[in-house]
Image (tube, rainbow, N blue to C red):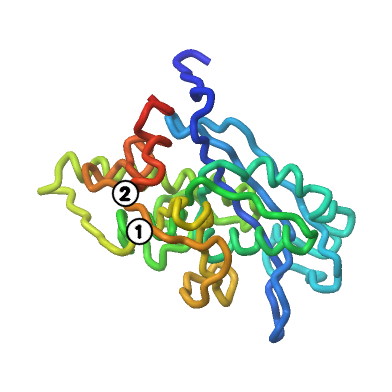
Amino acid sequence: MEGFIPCQEGSAEIVFFDIETTVPNRTGQRFCVLEFGAIVVCPRNLVELESYSTLIKPKDLSVVALRSGRSDGITRDAVANAPGFEEVADKIFNLLNGRVWGGHNIQRFDCVRIKEAFADIGRPPPVPVGIIDSLGVLTEKFGKRAGNMKMASLATYFGLGQQKHRSLDDVRMNLEVLKHCATVLFLESSLPSILNGSWHSPSTITTRSRSSAGKLTCKEETSRKSPTYQRTVPYTRESLGKCSDESKFHIIADLEEQRLNDDIPSIFNEGILA
């Protein structure tokens, strides 16, 4: 491809991922993973390097609805002949382990479900070198001008169509939303006195802390994709990095120039991506 600059070997690739699950309908019932989807992108140019998606059959098929309320939702028949999680665990582990994880509200939902799924088959979970949760990043940098900041609301705001609630489609939509937000912030930073959109809230870019033996923290939510902040669950986090304030549009357009924190500056700033 003319003009294509390949991602430098050894660079910290970002894997955007999403899972679809059952929705518990009684106390004590757990979420069951029904689908996993991911794309691996180069942080230098956002080129998609790899993609993967699979339906996943839960051990108890009765927890999956016979019919879905969504036109293209996941039904019991759809997953009846899908592989179990243990059959796709190696592929999912290799996609996630040792990469920067990206996604929408993944800290409080997706990464928790991934850990649970690996625990259920008696295997250690994959470990990220950093987490970029677009829910918090966009709430801080873009503000709630798109409403409740759910992916469906953001997609509608930018005219990207309806969210399908299928893993791979939602992952690609997530990246497009980030690109659109970055473009808007770039334009606003070019003419701040005319196009001014300053919004602030806590950042959710997290990194591995040396003092916590490489563990990261996620907080579990009580309902699917709901940004509630309650109990602390595995992936302990000792410190939070912050996006650079040098330029708002560095969320994704110049991601390699963000200093996540002192723990992993080399990912984007000290030659690995240079």
Checking the image for residue 243, the label placed there is: 2
- Left or right of residue 6, residue 28 in this image: right
Q: Amino acid at mark 1?
A: Ser
Residue 105 x, y percent position in the rendering: 50, 61
Q: Is residue 140 above or below residue 257?
A: below
Q: Count up the numbered dots.
A: 2
Residue situated in front as seen by the camera: 7 or 179: 7
Quick one: label 1, few (<14), some, or many (20+) residues within 10 Å?
many
| Real-space CA distance between mark 1 and mark 2, rounded to the nearest whole angstrom | 7 Å
Q: Residue furthest right?
A: 81
Q: CB atoms at circles 1 and 2 under 8 Å apart?
A: yes
252 relative position to 106: left or right? left
Residue 69 location, x and y as percent?
Answer: 69, 69
Residue drawn at x 31%, y 55% as measured from the top left: 142
Q: Name the foreground residue: 177 vs 16.
A: 16
Q: Quadrant of residue 125?
A: bottom right
| Residue 152 visible (yes or no) | no
Q: Residues within 10 Å of mark 2 (few under 14, many from 20)?
A: many
Secondary structure of residue under mark 1: loop
Q: Residue at x 50, y 25 (%)?
A: 7
Does residue 220 appear anywhere in the picture?
Answer: yes
Image-quadrant location for residue 51? top right
Q: In screen coordinates, is 265 left or right of 235?
A: left
Callout 2: SS: loop
Query: In the rendered image of this protein, does residue 6 appear above or below residue 161?
Result: above
Q: Residue at x 36, y 30 (%)?
A: 270
